Amino acid sequence: MPLRLSLLDHVLASFNLLPSPLFDTPLVPGIAQALVTACELNLFDTLDHGALTLDSLAERLDCHPEGLKLLLQVLISAGYIWERKGRYRNSRIARRWLLTSSPFSVAPYILHSPDIVAIWKNLPAAIRTHQPSLRMPYEEDASDPEVQRQLSRHYAGLAALASVVGREIIYKIRLPKGASSLVDIGGSHAAYSAMLCHKYPHLQATVLDIQPGIEAGMRTVERQKLAKQIHFVCTDLLHDAFEQQFPATFDAALYFHIAHLLQPEQNRALLTKVIATLKPGGQIFFVDQIPHQTRYSGLANIMVQLMANTMEIVGGTCYSFPEVKDWLLSCGMEQVREHRLLTPGATLISARKKTT
Ligand SMILES: C[S@@+](CC[C@H](N)C(=O)[O-])C[C@H]1O[C@@H](n2cnc3c(N)ncnc32)[C@H](O)[C@@H]1O
């Protein structure tokens, strides 16, 4: 965690004797930049095979030792690096969450985070006008090399996030008995479909997305050798009648992190099409940042609130459980249930398609 307060800091802060707003900025953004810089330099992976002295680490990272020392000091204070007798090594946090070799690595999301921070520069305009001032990244011209790089960071970041939050979600998902087919709406990187295919080896998953998303998904499929189980269909979810290609075809649908991108009427229209692709009794699994479901976690609260602010800038929003439930019931679903997750910031909702 970036801000590690000593007991004295805590006591002074609790008596309101410290200028706490100065910790939120510029301290936290400064620590964030140090972390992004370390990931861009590949610092944590370089320390994966053991502790190194400043000079040998600087040589491997092609940095000046005196410059690198300053960065290391911040990373030590923030809890990412340990130093002993002049040798530097990864902390437990860095080993679990930042190494390419770790199945829990969120490093790709850290590398993507400056793109999110750049969106926040438009927050004042969005708050004043309650109008989007930027387009969604998916609406940008995907033939532009800079947009391609940005989308590639975005999908890699989302896939990394899936490796963290996905385990708990996939553990909680119980597909209908004998289920053999799944549609993953806007599934792009295919990480959730891949986890479900590992859990249900007879499952066939179809990922619907735009071409740049599919390219990210194909990399996952190739890495995890799932070409026989995961297939891709390039479609515009909002404008194409994909449900005509798949009438009552699937046992289950994933609708993960899609709702917050869309207006309520768009969600209702898209869900209607998705549900038309489900067999009677088929299930939909919905994951998103849901406000008011997170009273148990301060972290979850702030994550959902920041997501709502981000979406305000690009024309989306975060929806409450009653709103989602209302869409699902009006689209012919029943048994709408909310499943609490320990991982902060996401909520799983499941529902079943009526059989009559
Ligand atoms: C926020 S991401 C969610 C990705 C994935 N479901 C997850 O939970 O990590 C939204 C996804 O919707 C896809 N998408 C956005 N607009 C789309 C459209 N009009 N047609 C098809 N896919 C779209 C994006 O490419 C992206 O993969």
Image (cartoon, helix red, strand yellow):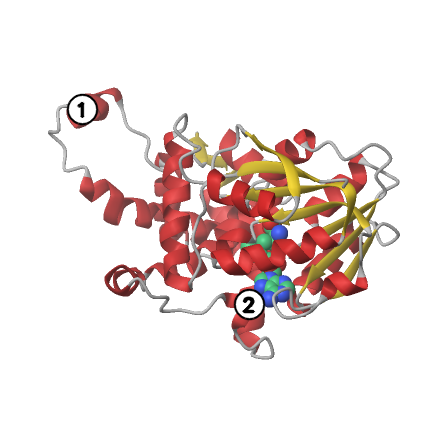
Label 2 sits on what residue type?
Tyr
Name the residue at 80% across, 42% down: 197
Q: Position of residue 101 (x, y in %)?
A: 66, 41
Q: Is mark 1 within 8 Å of ligand 1?
A: no
Label 1 sits on what residue type?
Ser
Q: Nearer the viewer, residue 173 or 333?
A: 333
Q: Position of residue 216 (x, y in %)?
A: 68, 60
Mark 2 vs 1, N-terminal side: 1
Which residue position holds label 1? 14
Q: Nearer the viewer, residue 242 or 170?
A: 242
Name the residue at 60% across, 79% down: 143
Which residue position holds label 2? 138
Q: Position of residue 329 (x, y in %)?
A: 59, 42
Name the residue at 62% across, 53% down: 271
Give the left or right position of residue 90, taking residue 116 as reference.
right
Quadrant position of residue 172: top right
Q: In the rendered view of the protein, which quadrant contains the C terminus?
A: top right
Residues packed near mark 1 inside 10 Å, few (<14), some (14 to 19) or many (20 plus): few
Q: How many marks?
A: 2
Q: Is mark 2 within 8 Å of ligand 1?
A: yes
Marks 2 and 1, Cα distance to the nearest angstrom? 44 Å
Image quarter where ligand 1 lies:
bottom right
Name the residue at 65% across, 34% down: 167
